[in-house]
Structure formats: C-alpha cells, structure tokens
C-alpha cells in the first residue's frame, strides 16, 4: 500500500449517499482526513464503494493502510449484516473485511453512530432551539430526518450517552389535531400503515406537499414545477419556496412539517425522559433552521398537557456538523481496533 501510518476508515451509508473517510486518533481526539461521498444509485454495492474509495484516494495521493473500519448503515443490524428497506444493497462485515484485507470491521445502525458522534462535535456546531436546563445525569434523545427518519434514546453513561439502536422512525404516526387526522386518513388511503417516516423525511415532506395541494386545490405555479424538475426532487424545491415565502402551499407544508416534527420530538423526549438534551440530526433540520426557530416546532414539542412544563425545560439542539455520523463511526472503529 504505502509507508504512511495506518488510519481508521469510517463510513456513513444512507438511502441516497455513502460517505467514507480516513481518520487519525491523536491523544484520544479524532482527526478527519481524506473523505469522499458517492451516490448510492451509481454503485452496485458496498464493496464497489470501498474499492472506488481506495482507488480515488490512491489517485489523489491520500491512500492509507487501514487498521480498522466501521460503517453506520440505515437499517437494523443483525449479526454483522444489514438488509435495509431503504438501501438496495446487502451489507455485511465480511464483504467489507475482504475489500480492505483486514479483520477489524464493524457495522452498526446509523443512528447509533450519529449519537456517538455527538460527543465528538464542537460546541459551536450546534444550533440551540431551546437553552433549557441540562441535567448532568439525564438521558437524551436523537431524531434525524433525512431520506428516512432515525430515532434513538440516549442513555446517560458517565459524561456521555450510550445510544440504543432503534427503528422508531417506522413506528406509527400519531396525529395531534383535526388537520393531522385528515392527513393520516389521506395517507392511509395511499400506504395503509402510516409511519412517522412517511411524514418526517424528504419523501415525507413531499407527501405533505401533495396533501396540501390536494386539500387546497391551489394549482402549482409553473416556476415551481420547473424548479422541481430542475432539482429532480420535490422536497428541496418546496423547502426553498417556503423559506423564500414564494408560495402559500409550500409555506403551509413546511409549517406542518415543523409542527409534526416538534410533536414527535416531544413524544420521544417523554419516552426517553430526555432531561439531558434533545438533538435533531439528519440532513433536513439544518436546512430549515429559520422555520424551526419561529415557534411552531417548540409549541408542538411542549404540547403534552400536564407535562408541557417538563418539556419546556429540556435543551433542544440541531446538529450542524454533517460529519457527526462519520465521527461516531470512527469512534466505533477505534474501539474495535483496541
């Protein structure tokens, strides 16, 4: 390979992208190195992704021998293997070990590595939605809406958290008012079972938009149709139009998304008794930060009757560092190598 010192290899595999990065560990601190991102749709599987990463790092003069590797994957992990509904690949530790020629390989749930990464992220890489009062011995929770919806309860363990792997995003959507009941009935007609992920994700935001158009019967402006076609995705186009206040239907869609996200975050916060903090990860929250700060999210978060005051004291933060999952995966790789 090369005479350069061995590195950790961390990966984050979602439904849309796979990210891979070298890391060094210096004095217990993780230092990111060369990193790339590939579209899942352009690859045949995880082995091709790793082989392309090694080839690209060689061409860039960044190739490193790998001492250990860990990959966070969207989906339940069983015996070092994932078959995910979101990813068109079967992913297993043996395939990765063979591609890298090493024995120290771990596959873990993507929310697990996101949660571990919280300890590695700098304080300035969080946007605070509610200061609250963090209890040093309190648990936390993490919700990550992106291509899908990940959820995890974070059990307090010393100064940090021990994340519990979860598929909570596939639990049933719980409407909070008459409008959301109408939304549930509309989605049931299309999907049968309606999970939180059917609403709180990129595709979920597109579902909310279709519901809003259907309900209001307002025609879609031509400029928006063209923008959706240009981006190839409804969700970013609707978000963009909503934040720019260019279309009322888009604005109502994003308002509903923020409110439902607040309600679900409050549900998870109660289940985990998250007096240690509520964290919003994933790709969507940083992109809609102005909306999350305008009050609709937090009002829904606290709308839990007698326990509203308890929720109002919980710290709520948005993770801004998109390397959070990679940092968590690197920490898993580091512990595996030891």
Image: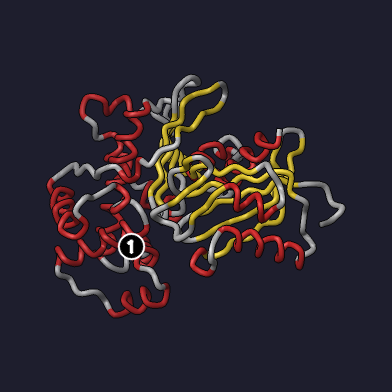
Which x, y percent locates residue 176? 19, 41
Front-lying residue, 284 or 10: 10
How many marks do you count on the picture? Answer: 1
Front-lying residue, 144 or 75: 75
Quick check: 227 above or below 82?
below
Quick check: 83 above or below 131?
below
Which x, y percent locates residue 146? 42, 53
Mark 1 packing: few (<14 Cα in 10 Å), some, or many (20+)?
many
What residue sits 32% from the left and 29% below the top? 270
Image quadrant in which the N terminus is located: bottom right
Which x, y percent locates residue 265? 34, 39
| Side (left or right) of 276 relative to 291 | right
| Side (left or right) of 37 relative to 110 | right
Residue that mark 1 sits on? 242
Image quadrant in which the C terminus is located: top right
What residue sits 67% from the left and 49% below the top? 9
What residue sits 28% from the left and 60% below the top? 251
Which x, y percent locates residue 49? 60, 61
């Amino acid at each position: 390979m090369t005479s350069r010192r061995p590195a950790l290899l961390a990966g984050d595999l979602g439904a849309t992208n796979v990210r891979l990065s070298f890391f060094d560990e210096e004095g217990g601190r993780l230092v990111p190195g060369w990193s790339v991102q590939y579209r899942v749709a352009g690859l045949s599987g995880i082995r091709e992704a790793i082989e392309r990463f090694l080839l690209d790092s060689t061409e860039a003069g960044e190739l490193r021998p790998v001492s250990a590797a860990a990959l966070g994957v969207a989906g339940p992990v069983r015996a070092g293997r994932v078959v995910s509904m979101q990813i068109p690949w079967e992913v297993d530790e043996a395939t990765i070990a063979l591609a890298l020629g090493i024995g120290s390989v771990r596959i873990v749930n993507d929310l697990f590595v996101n949660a571990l990464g919280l300890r590695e992220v700098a304080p300035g890489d969080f946007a605070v939605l509610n200061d609250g009062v963090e209890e040093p011995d309190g648990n936390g929770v993490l919700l990550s809406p992106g291509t899908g919806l990940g959820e995890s309860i974070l059990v307090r363990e010393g100064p940090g958290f021990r994340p519990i792997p979860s598929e909570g995003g596939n639990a049933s959507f719980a409407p909070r008012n008459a409008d959301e009941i109408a939304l549930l009935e509309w989605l049931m007609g299309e999907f049968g079972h309606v999970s939180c992920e059917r609403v709180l994700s990129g595709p979920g935001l597109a579902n909310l938009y279709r519901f809003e158009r259907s309900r209001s019967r307002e025609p879609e402006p031509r400029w928006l149709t063209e923008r959706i076609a240009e981006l190839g995705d409804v969700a970013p186009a609707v978000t963009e139009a909503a934040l720019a206040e260019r279309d009322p239907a888009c604005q109502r869609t994003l308002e509903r998304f923020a409110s439902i996200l607040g309600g679900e975050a409050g549900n998870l916060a109660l289940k985990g008794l998250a007096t240690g903090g509520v964290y919003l990860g994933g790709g969507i929250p940083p992109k809609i930060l102005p909306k999350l700060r305008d009050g609709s999210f937090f009002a829904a978060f606290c709308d839990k009757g007698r326990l509203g005051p308890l929720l109002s004291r919980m710290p709520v933060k948005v993770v801004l560092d998109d390397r959070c999952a990679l940092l968590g995966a690197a920490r898993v790789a580091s512990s595996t190598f030891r």
